[in-house]
Image (cartoon, rainbow, N blue to C red):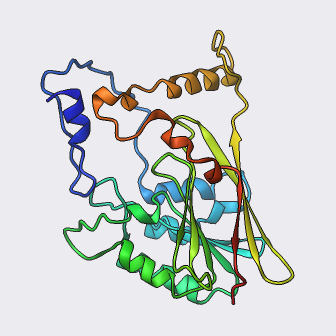
Amino acid sequence: MTLKQTLQAFDEVGPASLPRAQDAPFEIVTADLTRRALERGEYAAKHLNSPGLPKGHGFTEEHAQKKHMYYSTNVGKVKLIVIDSVNEFGGWQGSLDLAQFNWLENEIKNSDRLVVLASHHPLSKMFNGYAPTGKRVCVDEITEMLLKYPRVIAWLAGHEHRHHIAWIGPEIEERGFWQIETASHADWPQQSRAVEIVQSHSGEIFIALTVIDHAAGPIYGAVQTPLDLAALSRVISANVWQKRESLGAKHPADWAKGEAHERNTVLRLDPRT
């Protein structure tokens, strides 16, 4: 296999695969015995033991015991629901298991606040229905459920490593929500996003979005400080080899920046009940 063929061989939908280019050079790396992957329960427990606030950052002892990575918390007057969109059976696109889907609808149904969802995958990439046992819930069923509840106003996501905004729902905005995707800290343009939600006296809802660059300069010098390292990382991300057309890149390098209206903007919604 060529490098291009190898990159194209990863499966969007499970089971997980690891294609190999048989003629590719390789290096044997000495194992670091002090490093290992954390399983889900341990990940939640680490947050419970973190000195940062709020305690647990949304996780509880129950999450650590049941190994559930989804939770809800109140942020001001908004209910934030964090979804675990990873399909544990394989594939790099997302979906929900049935228990989480039912939990999600119950959380929304019983909320007296405006609801914002957050996940790794955007709704458009929730089509990984692979499951050796049980059922995975995918984009169509999730969309149908969410559009029943006008209190859902936004879905925050990453995964695609780009700035992108899309309206999900009917043209008449009595229900529906904004899907807000944000670029990656690793890939160009290495930006994050501030989200501010305001409701007027008339009930109109405004979501102000501001793109934020990290503090590193445009050059990296001798790479002696964290900011030097961040500057080097930005330079490398702007010259990423996977974006070359010769390797079959689907999008130009600046695709991740999104359009101007998908970066610094204010989104509006009609009053919700």
Residue 75 occupies quadrant: bottom right
Q: At which x and y percent is residue 194?
A: 71, 53
* Residue 195, above or below 139: above
Residue at the right extreme? Answer: 201
Percent of width and height locating residue 200: 84, 77
Q: Quadrant of the C terminus?
A: bottom right
- Residue situated in front as seen by the camera: 63 or 7: 7
Q: Is residue 132 left or right of residue 205?
A: left
Which residue of the protein is positioned furthest toward the top in this rendering? 222
Relative height, residue 143 to residue 132 (above, below): below
Residue at image position (69%, 37%) is: 213
Where 238 sits versus 259, above or below? above
Q: Residue at x 74, y 57 (%)?
A: 53
The picture quadrant where one finds residue 271 is: bottom right
In this image, 174 relative to 126: left or right?
Answer: right
Q: Name the quadrant of the N terminus.
A: top left
**How far across and how far down the image is residue 123, in percent?**
45, 66
Q: Residue furthest front?
A: 171
Q: How many marks can you see? A: 0
Q: Position of residue 195 (x, y in %)?
A: 71, 58
State the residue at coordinates (48%, 64%): 69
Question: Quick one: 29 or 77, which is closer to the camera?
Answer: 77
